[in-house]
Every structure is written in structure tokens, then in C-alpha cells.
Image (cartoon, grey):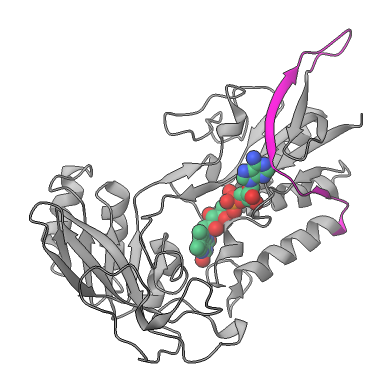
Amino acid sequence: MTLHNVVIVGSGPAGYTSAIYLSRAGLKPLMVTGALTPGGQLVNTTEVENFPGFPDGVMGPDLMDAMKAQAEKFGTEFEHADVESIVEVPAEGDDVKPTYHLTLDTGDELDARAVIVTTGSTYRKLGVPGEIEYSGHGVSYCATCDGFFFRNKPIVVVGGGDSAFEEALYLTRFGSSVTLIHRRNEFRASAIMVERARANEKLTLLTDTVVTAIHGEAPAAAPAAAAIKPAGQGIQLNLGKPTNGISLGNAGGLSLAAPAVGNVSSIDILNTVTGETGTLDTKAVFVAIGHTPATGFLGDLVDKDEDGYVLVDGASTRTSRQGVFAAGDCVDRVYRQAISAAGMGCRAALDAQAYLA
Ligand SMILES: Cc1cc2nc3c(=O)[nH]c(=O)nc-3n(C[C@H](O)[C@H](O)[C@H](O)COP(=O)(O)OP(=O)(O)OC[C@H]3O[C@@H](n4cnc5c(N)ncnc54)[C@H](O)[C@@H]3O)c2cc1C
């Protein structure tokens, strides 16, 4: 079996950046892209306006295609699969370094001298009707990424931890109002964050409340790809008003299979104590109920924190296991941006290069 210099697991901005550096250095990396979403999280978004080098913005899938082309041009090879497990093969004879044996969901097996893990994380979802349909059209999981699109519009944030409060406070810069909805009447967020939120005139806290459905307006017509933007910027046609009360259907007769959706216009809410229901008009729903790093397949290979984020040594990308490096959102619970993941991917490539030298 071929012994690869480096196998990169995951094909988001961190993985592609590692691949570009390693292939330019002549190390011929092999990338295992992930079976379901090669290209990573940005493949599921529309316009990215904060990645440097694109003054007019760039569509997420186009950005990821360009990163792939750049990695391919310098000799990166790709395998479209998920890694199911990685085990260390102890060094033998005069070898001082172990190798790694990877098993893929296709049944293929790979051996590598070094591994870079860039498997990202997934946003926890509310799991309510309308959430998936309006994702990227008013439903967002990232205030830094999308807050700008909702200037002077009413915004809802769902969650009760520090991140939810941070996002809500940040969004008061843009929204005409921000309503933070939390299912309990106590918050996990620190007291200072709650205090700040209470002192902010634009921010309303709605406790003991859950969102039960997200509604939107029907699209004007199938828009050209480049014209699709998050809610607040797209064209809106008021073909069907959302119903009051809890509804399991889509407002405006949209179905899951609809080729395009309009933008968010309202949500249904339920008071978990009184059982009262209601409707709240909003143009954006920011879901801030946590992330799950995609690191389960690593088992005990490397040290992780209590939430599953891979732990690295200081500012490096070295994990607790020599020869295994990690970068991007599977490590970073704070910044979670394409550019920060790409920067860390660069560091992982340089760390791996130094390890292999
Ligand atoms: C809707 C949305 C909009 C966003 N908008 C912006 C924005 O405008 N600007 C910005 O800077 N950031 C934005 N972000 C955040 C940004 O996408 C992430 O910070 C970034 O993609 C993280 O990059 P990554 O390389 O760490 O991981 P990811 O992009 O998450 O890629 C991880 C990769 O690993 C693969 N993978 C997972 N498990 C396995 C496995 N077992 N085997 C093999 N492969 C595996 C996945 O298939 C995927 O290809 C947005 C995120 C979302 C969800």
C-alpha cells in the first residue's frame, strides 16, 4: 500500500489551504474530502463578503471551487469519502516516527506519515419547520457573517449562552430591533453579558419561549444564482401571508422541494410555561444554540475538550499525538471564520512539513 506523506481529512478552507501549501512544497498530499459536503460549510451559503481579495463578494461554492482548483494545480490528489477511523502504527526498526492507518467509509484504506484533521463543525439546528428552507434566506448561524445583511430590520436570536448574547449584542449594531428568545427563564450566559443585554435599548429578552416554525414570503421568480442573497437583500413578493399560530406547513404554499424560497418574514412562538402561542414578525433568525465539532471519528487518537474540539499545543496545530495536526473549526470554538480556518490550515501545513523534514 502507498505510504502517503500527508493525508488531509476534510475539504473546507482549512483543508484546501493546507493542501495548497503542501503540494507547492512537493509533498503530494492526498485529501479525503468528506462524502457529503466536499468544500465544507461555505458550499451551503450564498454570498461571502468578508473573505479578503473579493471586493464585490464571492459566492461560497465559487470560492471553494477556486480553492480546490488551486490545490489541484499543484498536485493535490482527492478521494471522495469520509474517514471512519485513524489508528497509529508504531514505528518499527530504525524508524523513529509512527505512521497512521486510515479506514474510509468506502472500504478503502490509506497509510500516511502525517495527518492533518480539518473536519470543521456543524451548527446545532432548531429542528423546526422552515429552518432548512430559509437557511441562507434569513435563517443564519453566524452573526459575524450575515448581520450586515439585516440593517434596519427586526432580528431574532435564539439561545441562552454567552455566544447567543454576544451575537445578539453584536446584531444591535445592524437591526432595528433584536429579540433574544430563550426556552428557560434563566440564562447560561455570564451575568455581565445578561446585564449588558438588559441595558441595551434595542434588545428584548423573551424567556420561557421556543420557536416552533419559521415562515417566509414566496420568491418573486427563480432568481439568477448571483442574485440570491440572505433575507433583507433579495426581492420579496408577498404572495402568501404566514398563518397565525403554530403551523407545520410552509407559508405561501412553498414546499421543501421548491427550487427557490423567499425570505423570512415571521416566526411562530410558544410559551413553555403558559402554553400560549403567537407570531413575531422578523426578517432574520440567528440560531445560536451551539456547535458540534466533527471529531467523533478520531476516538481517543488525540486529546479533545469536553465538547469534542481537538486540543492543540499553544499557537501551533500539533495535537497530543505526534504527526497528527488539526486546524479550522474542529479546533477553533471562538473565531469560526473561513479566513481564520484558512490561516490555521496554512500553519498546519508548515507544522506537518517541519515534522516530516
Ligand atoms: C451558512 C454559513 C455561512 C457562512 N458564512 C461565512 C462567511 O460569510 N464568512 C466566513 O468567513 N465564514 C462563514 N461561515 C463560516 C465558515 O464557513 C467556516 O468557519 C469555515 O468553513 C470553517 O472551515 P473548516 O475548513 O474548518 O471546516 P468546514 O468548512 O466545516 O469543512 C469541513 C470539511 O470536513 C469534511 N469532513 C467532516 N468529517 C469528515 C470525515 N470524517 N472524513 C472526511 N471529511 C470530513 C466535511 O465534509 C467538510 O468538507 C459560514 C458558515 C455557514 C454554515
Query: Where 322 falls versus 42 (above or below)?
Result: above
Give the left or right position of residue 15, taking residue 125 as reference: right
The image quarter in which residue 97 lies: top right
Q: Is residue 64 above or below residue 193?
A: below
Residue 341 can be seen, yes or no: no
Residue 98 falls inside the magenta stretch: no
- Which quadrant holds the C terminus? top right
Going by the image, does 303 lie left or right of 134? right
Looking at the picture, does residue 322 appear above or below residue 191? above
Judging depth in this view, the residue of 308 and 26 nearest the camera is 308
Q: Position of residue 282 (x, y in %)?
A: 27, 75
Q: Is residue 83 left or right of residue 278?
A: right
Q: Is residue 64 visible?
A: yes
Q: In terms of depth relative to the viewer, which is nearer, 265 or 321?
A: 265
Residue drawn at point x = 77 percent, y = 45 percent: 31
Q: Residue furthest top?
A: 93
From what the image shows, is residue 332 above or below residue 314?
below
Residue 167: where, in percent of width, then height?
32, 58
Farthest residue to the left: give it.
Answer: 274
Which of the four quarters of the rendered structure image does ligand 1 lie in?
bottom right
Q: Which contiguous range is marked in magenta?
A: 73-97
Q: Residue furthest right?
A: 1
Give 10 or 84, whichever is nearer the viewer: 84
Residue beneath the point at 76% across and 25% down = 100
- Find out whether residue 80 is within the magenta segment: yes
Residue 324 screen position, x and y as percent: 68, 29
